[in-house]
Amino acid sequence: MRVLLALLLLTSLIAEESFFSRHGVTVSVELETTADGPVIAATFQPRPQDPPLHLYGMGLTPGGAGVPTNLRLAPGSPVRARGPLRDDQPVHDLDGLPVYPDGTAVTLRLPISAPAGSGEIPVEVRVSYMACTAEACLVPVNDAPLILRVPGDGSAPAAVGGGAALDDIRAVIREELAGTQAKLRAELRAELAAAAEPHAIRWRRPADRAAAEALIAEAHAAGKAAILDFTGPSCINCLLMAKTVFRVPAVARAWNSGVPIEIDTDPPHEDLAAWQQERFATQNRPLYIRIAPDGSEVRWDRVFDPSDTATLERLVALLERGESAAGDATGTGSGWGEFLLLAVLGGLFTLVMPCTYPMIPFTVNMFTKQAAGGAKLLPLAAAYALGIIACFVGLGVLITGVFGASLTTLAGHPITNLLIGVLFVVLGLSLLGAWFLTPPSWLQNAAGGARGGYFGALLMGLTFAITAFTCTAPFAGAVLAAGVAHGAWGSAVLGMAIYSGTIALPFFLLALAPGWLARLPRAGAWMNEFKVVGGLVEIAAACKFLAICDHAWGWGIIGRTFCLASWSAIALAIAAYVLGWWRHDGDESIKHAGLGRLSAAIICAALAIWLASGLAGNHLGLIESFFPGDAAP
């Protein structure tokens, strides 16, 4: 009971405040007495500074850009409003938003009824506001509590039926304290983010296509250009631009010269993704479209480093004045080169994976027997390669056929990222020896049942793709995910064709010249080491996909800190492994680390230190774009 009384006293002391100063504004409440009854007056005084601060008008629509200045009674208040809330300052239009004059104090007045009871009754009110300059805004304040005492009307207070149970009182106190703590934590995070982003873009964030069209019309009615940013938490290049280029003051000012509208096309915003496809005939991300008041459009989809001053100036010119240079927006999306390179590199890495490499002698042996029987190797090799390509391209066709034009929503969906992340973890643990994955024998037998002729070679190619599933799935999944995120219909099919073609080409050449097999290195201990390193890398890669799930579902676990710490630890583990400081089952002991092992260990150790520096506040460039829920240093 004493603890309960102490908590009640603590809560009352915390709440017994009729003023505070927070985020650039001092707020005070007082009671004014009029002939019609009491009036609560809340005064919002921006601190004096240069450039001056202004407050948003109380008529600002909630949920968009900015926070309206507001005063309201707390839920369960002993008084009720007997008239509308009124302000004492005029508002003017700023970028289509109602704001009060710069540096001017604003007083909001709310007429209330007298509370029942005798003496002074504590009444809790909630205030909200956001202070901004012409360049940036401070952290908003939402529903901050203040207390003032209002004289009662002299009547007897209404009895509480049955009395309040002690457990109910405790529950209310716990709920209030938990809410206060959560609010303070949120405000602290926002304060830190604002300190890291002194030049903020005043984003308007529509929830659907109707709201997006309304914002465009609102911008044009104010004589300003609407500047659209098509983005999403799963778009790495979008986050990279937001965490690097958009932080440049000149770029932020250029965005704010119009009405910046951020269009999130990741789930659950499928309506906005469809609107982008229907109105602008593209799913590319990032994509910036400036729509002038006369309806003319210019586009930008290039991703670049802010140190490229020439490109930076062109982006600023496009955002501010609608000036566009050739090559700034191709209409086909940036990153095609990176996407195609990923497909090729994925195929090359797949070729040296443990469950792929043993297929080489098996393949050449089959073609040697075919050649001895008088068969022509060229069409047989082509059929075998076609089988490999057909298997992977079929997967791409399945993805695009099922999901059609909604590829970006597929890539950004948390369930998709969860499945990919879990797959990477499962296959990584498999490569580390936790378990052994293999397709059912009936499936392998069905695919490889015919051994002769062109059809047999085709089925052998399918057999290779099925047998090598445990090694190909992570790389094929990465190529598919990149193709889906790229946005162009059929890019997943193209990516899988290039990926599987890269795998099939060496087998095609070996089938034509079986004698080349003697020149290949034999399988041995090196393959097991490659498998262990590959397993650790796959587990590290899973963090990137799980971070998107964490952001979407609000786990608060797999964010920037968790990922960087995990990646740094994994890089150190790989360095120790290649030096022989720890070994895996089936590995040979290393008595002497040669130049190759020493070089690999130094690279991994340096990578671990660099990743760990991100935990100390170092900006890690591209890596920062993997964490949609965390601001970059």
Image: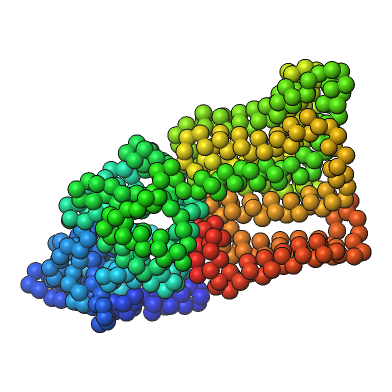
Above-or-below relation of 600 to 469: below
Q: In this view, does 539 lie to the left or right of 522?
A: left
The answer to which image quadrant residue 133 occupies is: bottom left
Asked whether residue 121 is in view, the answer is no
Q: Where is residue 333 in the image (x, y as percent from the top left)?
A: 44, 45
The number of discs equals 0
Q: From this viewpoint, is residue 566 visible?
A: yes
Residue 590, position in %: x, y?
A: 90, 61
Residue visible at 82% across and 64% down?
595
256 or 545, which is in the foreground? 256
Residue 415 position, x and y percent, is 55, 43
Q: Estimate the x, y position of residue 186 in percent, counting from the top left.
A: 44, 66
Question: Which residue is more in the foreground, 160 or 102?
Answer: 102
**Residue at x-position 46% and y-position 48%:** 334
| Drawn side of residue 142 relative to residue 245, left or right | left
* Left or right: 472 as drawn, with respect to 186: right
**Residue at the outermost bottom position:** 48
Residue visible at 31% across and 60% down? Answer: 317
Position above or below: 371 against 92: above
- Using the rendered view, name the quadrant where residue 368 is placed: top right
